[in-house]
Amino acid sequence: MKNLLCFFTLLLFFSLSSIAQLPDSILNQVDTLVKNLEQSLIEYEEKLDIAASKNIITAKEIMNRGYDNLDELINSVQGMYLTNEWTTSQIGARGVSPSELNNQRMLVLIDNIPLNNPMTGQAPSGIELRGIPMENIESVTIIRSPMGILYGNSAMNGVIRIKTKKSKKGVGVFVDAGSFGKYDVGLSLGQTWEKTSLSLSTRLGSILGQDIYIPEYNAAIPESDQMDYAGIQLKLNHKNLSVKGSYFQREGAIIFAHDPVVAPDSTSDAFFEGGTYFERSLFADISYDGPIKENQSIHARLFLNYDLDERQLEYVWGSGNILEKNRTQENIWAGVEYQHLFKFQQDHQLLLGTEFWHIPIANYTSSELNGPDTNLDFTYWTLGIFAHDSYQFQNGFAINGGIRADLNSFTDPVFSPQIAMLYTPTQKTTLRAGYSRGYRLPSILETDVIQEFQPLPNPDLIPEISNNLELGWKQQLGRDLNVDITLYYQQLDNVILNSLTMFQSDNAATLEAMGLEAGLSIDLPENIQTYLYYNFQFDNETKVNMPSPLCKFGVTVPFLKHFTLFAEGQHEGSRYTWDGTYTLPYFLMNSNLRFSPKVDSSKKNAKWLNQSSISFRVYNLFDQFYQHPSRQELQTRFMGQNGRTWQAKLVLQF
């Protein structure tokens, strides 16, 4: 850990020294080019997924809606749903999300830095992302289609891009308190100069978690997701050069309760899993986004990630036997990414890119009381190369497409093609169609045999593949009414599933999902905004784990100049569980009331009030009882969820 901190310090020092030594003539020349091309890569990234379904949640919407973490935000997006499992949450999209560890198939990025763990492949969820204050987020883009061509591994079901805010001068403070003994405090400091900005933010919090009632035991398990967490973020920008760093840790209690394996009315083979955990993660990043000459711009990035997960577990069988086990997962991964955009003319652009990952350390250790110890070290690499071309015709027709090839040290090469078409016959009508492909490499912990988890990774496993087809129609009716309808079909091949009896992983499954998404948004007078989403899954079979139908709506109402009221509702249909039963449908209602003073900006002493707010959010307003399906490895069929919860938040910006 000390070596990592030294590396990060040297990285930061080198960046600052490099900036200081750049000649003014070069900086001025780059500054001139920035005026014309600094948005080129951002704009082209939007064109890459013209046929993909996506939602963008802005900072203003996050504040008005009062979202406490990324889970709540994701759960509000069309076609997205969650499976909460007490200490973790699984992100689902469009029904092709197996209930086992489906976060492996969703790529999560923060400022273009991938957060998926290379050892497990899993993406962090809202709980793990508590180190990112929602106040620091500029926008969250959720793509509900495979995007392997641009993002490579893990972008199999979709991509979640988190963009943090630019540094600005001032001091920010937030204080948050809520149900289950939750408290959360944060402080941010920012300073800006002529062409340079620096920001530093910290966060500290704790939550006890809900009491979980287990019907099979007729008992409650207290404080199932107890957690203390802390994080710090640093961001330095000089023109188009950026240096970022983040450190986050959390620790708490682990309590699972497993059904009896033999029969629900017998506790002879049942067991509880208890213990503690400690996790820490660190990343550092240097990037440049901007032009290098006329009609050309680049994105270049160097990053380093570190992740540690320590768990001290205790298994208690119904017979009273106790097994103690300590497990540690530690890995480091570093990478470099380069993209070069050529603008041949206004309607023709070509993007070439490459990405290289190297995992020099991936260590798995475990020790058991009166049992064998395991200590495994691995190293591997991946290399991706892609080309993507985009052309827009004069008659409102646009087409783009490309291909990506990925090589790695332990499986065959993977190819990810994409093609998309967009037709706008009128300013108010848009038709789109596209095919995209994604993939996921087997993770290190998807094992072959039970003896000491050897060999790792499994040489018999091949990458999972996802193929997606979409047809969409978007229509503006009048000035303030928009309709968006999408028909999609997605197939997952070579899906890796684990056998609970043999502890083996096999490319044993093929999953299909076909459905219809319909969205309606209306902007009413007095700045009232509404949305309505409806998803219907044509097939709701085993392993799909998709609520069908899935209906969501929301309305934002400003009133009395200083207040904003947000209300959202969600209806989930039945969801198929691993043992062939169904969860019960349910309806949830959430609300948030926000007070944000608006004062005359000419009054300098009161300007800070315009950036400050007080909010009060209630989740599950009507205190509905509802359940999510569990993973098969937990043996429980359903998992009871939180009842009514609340939170109050104060945000001050000076």
Image: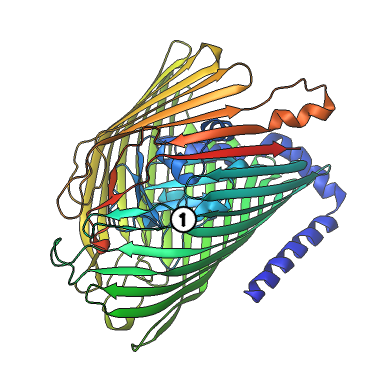
What residue appears at the point 60 percent right and 58 percent down from the top-left corner? 230
Residue 518, given in percent of the width and then of the height, sits at 33, 27
Is 35 placed above or below 396 here? below
What residue appears at the point 84 percent right and 58 percent down from the top-left corner? 21
Q: Amino acid at mark 1?
A: Pro
Residue under label 1, please give it: 124
Residue 134, given in percent of the width and then of the height, sits at 57, 43
Residue 75 appears in view: yes
Is 356 placed above or below 639 here? below
Is 2 placed above or below 560 here? below
What residue appears at the point 20 percent right and 74 percent down from the top-left corner? 502
Quadrant of image for the C terminus:
top right
Residue 340, given in percent of the width and then of the height, sits at 59, 49
Quadrant of image for the N terminus:
bottom right
Q: Quadrant of residue 635?
A: bottom left
Residue placed furthest toward the front: 219
Count the labels in the image. Answer: 1
Residue 111 appears in view: no
Question: Which of 572 and 463 lies nearest the eye of the viewer?
Answer: 572
Residue 204, given in percent of the width and then of the height, sits at 61, 54
